[in-house]
Image (cartoon, rainbow, N blue to C red):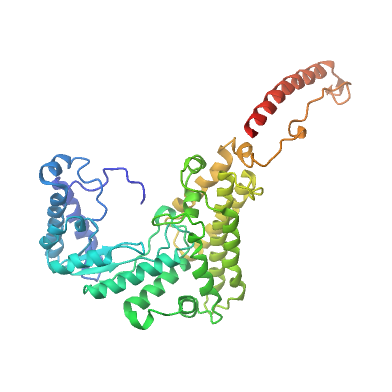
Amino acid sequence: WGTMQGPFSLCPGDPGSLELVRGLYDELLPHFSSKQFNVGCDETFDLGQGRSKEECLRRGVERVYLDYLLKIHREVEERGYTMQFWGDIIVHTPELISELPKNSIALEWGYEADHPFDEHGAMFASSGIPFYVCPGTSSWTSIAGRTDNAVGNLLSAAENGLKHGAAGYLNTDWGDHGHWQALPVSYLGFAVGAAYSWALEANRDMDIAAVVSTHAFRDPTGSMGRVAYDLGNIYKAPEVTVHNGSALFWTLQRPFEQLRKSERPWPRYAALLEAIDGAMAPISHARMQRPDAALIVREYENTARLLRHACLRGQLAAQQQGGEGATPEALDDDMRDIIREYEDIWLARNRPGGLTDSVAALEKARADYKSDSTITKRVQTNTRVVSEGDFAPCKPANSLAGHTWQGTPCPALIFLDTLICILYNSFRSSKKATLKSRLK
């Protein structure tokens, strides 16, 4: 998810689309015991851009969407199931909500702390359409989570779900762009969502770090919950707001050239490195009573290492002071080691499916350190003084010593050595002039 190049949705005007859906339902539904069925139908941004363009211009995008959704509902109902569908499209045309079947369930989703659960919940409630509120853990596209955003989002969903009579609370966890977050990063969001949805008033003022430490990590010292809470708030430290993600995540995802051309302000990476170390400090005091305690420590240590790597990558791209150690060679070695540990950790807890794609995204970041031949010359040019030794002159040999061919002294090799030095010194002079002009 994340690359919106259409068209990518089924064409609602093509009878083959509905035939395809029927076949999938008949093949898959018998394998599940639940009688509630989520048919999706969210984020249909491309509707009206492909083969459905003419029909959408004539009847309206919203009407075309709703009519197709009603056809889907009939297929689901005929098979004895209750249709759930994501409600993000229909809320843009509130006047059509009342036409939805009363025996369907709208899934009102949104993942920012300020998502309008109140406004959208009121729409569904006034139309008599059952709905769930669907917040999320805020773990995806963040590496380490977004604690404060998750708490705000989960709390708002509970408050406004109760206010407007929501039929349920669906806590979501996603893995966009490679699913770089380890499973325990989501534990805080899982725990908070469970507490707020089950008993909001009893849990509204709970000590989240302590509760997560006790009930999710089984750590009586409170240390692991503290690490999860504070490392999950590193996303706030750059003071660079990113919708549905973190600045450090995108520092790893985006190529160097795109990072350099960005008009966003650069985070203060040196301060971020200190914040990461501070957030991780309590992990040595954790005493988790779980069989996977050692694995959780490894997962968090590699998570912190990814965050630190993103900071060094940012320093390299931004040419910030304090990033002298952020050389392409050092970052290449660091990412190689991160990937090795990442693969081991993934396979210790998860099936292999998805690992190749996930690692490919990390390898793409690593490729920058090898492919950008000019990066070493760009970094730190504002503070580095180019010395004469950077381009020391070449001196040709003045004797036959060391210039032999099959053990016999060879004057031709001295001539070749002299010619190479002449060419090199010519290059040296032009290169020094170029570097000095860049330093001005």
Image location (x, y in percent) of residue 425: 74, 23
Q: Is residue 36 above or below residue 16?
A: below
User: Is residue 8 rendered to the left or right of residue 142?
Assistant: left
Q: Nearer the viewer, residue 14 or 438?
A: 438
- Can residue 228 be seen here? The reply is yes
The quadrant where residue 74 appears = bottom left
Residue drawn at (33%, 66%), measured in percent from left and top? 135
- Measuring from the top left, give residue 409's x and y in whole percent: 87, 20
Q: Is residue 103 visible?
A: no
Q: Position of residue 278 (x, y in %)?
A: 59, 66
In the picture provided, is 408 more to the left or to the right than 31? right
How many numbered callouts?
0
In which image quadrant can residue 381 be found? top right
- Looking at the figure, which quarter contains the C terminus? top right
Q: Position of residue 158 (x, y in %)?
A: 31, 73
User: Observer-nearest residue: 356 or 156?
Assistant: 156
> Of residues 372 and 147, which is closer to you in this image?
147
Q: Residue at x 61, y 76 (%)?
A: 285
